[in-house]
Amino acid sequence: MAAELIDGKKLAAETRAQIAAGVAALKAEKGVTPGLAVILVGDNPASVSYVTAKEKACVEAGMNSHEIRLSADVAEADLLAEIARLNADPAIHGILVQLPLPKGFGEHKVIDAIAPEKDVDGFTPVNVGKMLIGEDCFLPCTPHGIVKLIEVTGMDLAGKHAVVIGRSNIVGKPVAVLLARRNVNATVTLCHTGTPDVGAFTRQADVVVVAAGHPNTLTGDMLKPGAVVIDVGVNRVPDATKPKGYRLCGDADFASCSAVASAITPVPGGVGPMTITMLLWNTLEAARRAAK
Ligand code: GUN
């Protein structure tokens, strides 16, 4: 039987309606409109489309979006000065620097310049450390969205085996941490490019989160029947039949995985909308804290 589709768009729409209501209440009660600053350095096409989607969603939720576009050859000192200015601006509650930065930038240095109370991506060392030790903090958006997507399948992750493929700072490592936290209580295996036989692990998994950045990283023969698959990949594959000359596909081979899994996220329309939603969530929370 074909797997059920985990509808990220639907969950995102429901959650964004709650966020929009929270934004309206904050405006009415405190006169505060959440403000998100989105910094894009350079013109990487995928990054341009991500930040455009984030800004649009921000405005749709009733928030103020501040777009900061810098050329790829901006001096790192100027980028850091821009972040310092935003840190000090009371109308800005959240700051996001779209990654990856062009070659030559010290990514850690740039992220570390964001004030932790405005770090709505949850990328600064302070927020990453708090997440690790279970303190209240801004959770990183894609991993947080993934936990919500697994929840809507109805699967109780406590005692289940989750296999994560990919060890990026943005997805793989933090999602492994969130799934292993006591409130979720999964047993977690983190596979990566140094894992000789990923299938040996995924075949034992109740949930597989694939965030490797390559199409066909996960195929149906690597799954236990009935597993839940969360596909984080967004890959552009050349396709002359499409108006843009490419189509999007995930890291999982959708046809073979959906024949074995019980539920799977589509690409697009799965994880992506939830990433943006959790960004709005964090921005509203940052504004609420600032208004207290
Ligand atoms: N690049 C890919 N995903 C993300 C994200 O969630 N936040 C930022 N800032 N950059 C990204």
Image (tube, helix red, strand yellow):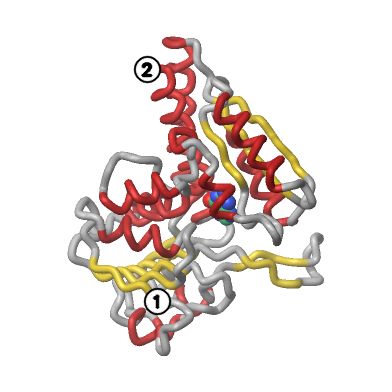
Quarter of the image where the N terminus is located: bottom left
Q: Residue furthest front?
A: 77
**Residue 191: which disc?**
1
Q: Is residue 53 above or below residue 94?
A: below
Answer few, some or many: residues within 10 Å of disc 2's Cα (few below 14, many 20 plus, some between 14 and 19). Answer: few
Badge 2 or badge 1: first in the primary sequence: 1
Q: Tell me the kind of residue under disc 1.
A: Cys
* Point 39% across, 53% down: residue: 149
Which of the pair 111/39 is nearer the observer? 111
SS at mark 2 in the image: loop
Q: Residue 17's x, y, as percent?
A: 47, 31
Q: Residue at x 75, y 72 (%)?
A: 238
Q: Nearer the viewer, mark 2 or mark 1?
A: 2
In the rendering, at what x and y percent does residue 19 appear? Answer: 45, 30
Residue annotated with mark 2: 292
Outermost residue on the bottom side: it is 196
Q: Is residue 105 left or right of residue 121?
A: right
Q: Residues within 10 Å of mark 1 (few under 14, many from 20)?
A: many
Where residue 257 appears, x then y in whole percent?
Answer: 46, 76
